[in-house]
Amino acid sequence: MKDIGPMHYFLGLEGWQRNGEIFLNQGKYTVEILKRFRMMDCKPMTKPMNSNLKLLCDESSKPFDPTVYRQMIGSFMYLVNTRPDICFVVNALSQYMVAPRQVHWIAAKHVLRYLKGKIGYGLSYVSDRKMELLGYTDSDWDGSTADRKSTSGCCFSLGSCMIS
């Protein structure tokens, strides 16, 4: 597609307007995060989180600097604006911001490695698609092995892309 409008950049949010499409992403902000945490040269990952990793309050894992951990998770929270693919893992990691451990830091760095391979991802709104709001929910009852709590989640799409 040929660009019909300039790229706009505002507070880390980039937007392109083309014939029948608007694309939003935060590629420059993603690169800034990778540079800030010295992960520009890391090996990219295909998934934002190891699927069988259980982030438990592991007492055997060493404590990690809460300030640095909070800075990284806070960066992820802002990035979620255009990256619903990392919502779940950001939510899971944010539960450990009070007393993070080394295992949580390793999982957070895994997210950075995932972002390294997906810098160009974003939200694409295409005009030829029906603007329909769709929602899905799921839950795992008694899914936490640590405290037997349940987890529920939902996702919503508008037109051609996920929004929440």
Image (cartoon, rainbow, N blue to C red):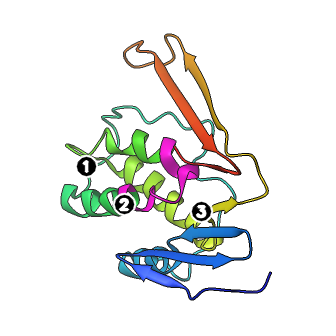
Q: Which of pointers 3 and 2 lies earlier in the amino acid sequence?
A: 2
Does the magenta stretch mainly form a helix, a strand or a loop? helix
Can you identify the residue that label 3 sits on? Answer: 114
Question: Which element is circle 1 on?
Answer: loop
Magenta residues? 77-88
Tag 3 secondary structure: helix
User: Residue at horizontal 52%, vertical 11%?
Assistant: 141
* Figure quadrant of residue 121: bottom right
> Which residue is the site of mark 1?
63
Three-letter residue code for mark 2: Tyr
Q: Which marked residue is nearer to the observer: mark 2 or mark 1? A: 2
Camera-nearest residue between 47 and 137: 137
Q: Where is residue 109 in the image (x, y as percent from the top left)?
A: 46, 61
Give the foreground label among 3 and 2.
2
N-term mark: 2 or 1: 1
Can you identify the residue that label 2 sits on?
78
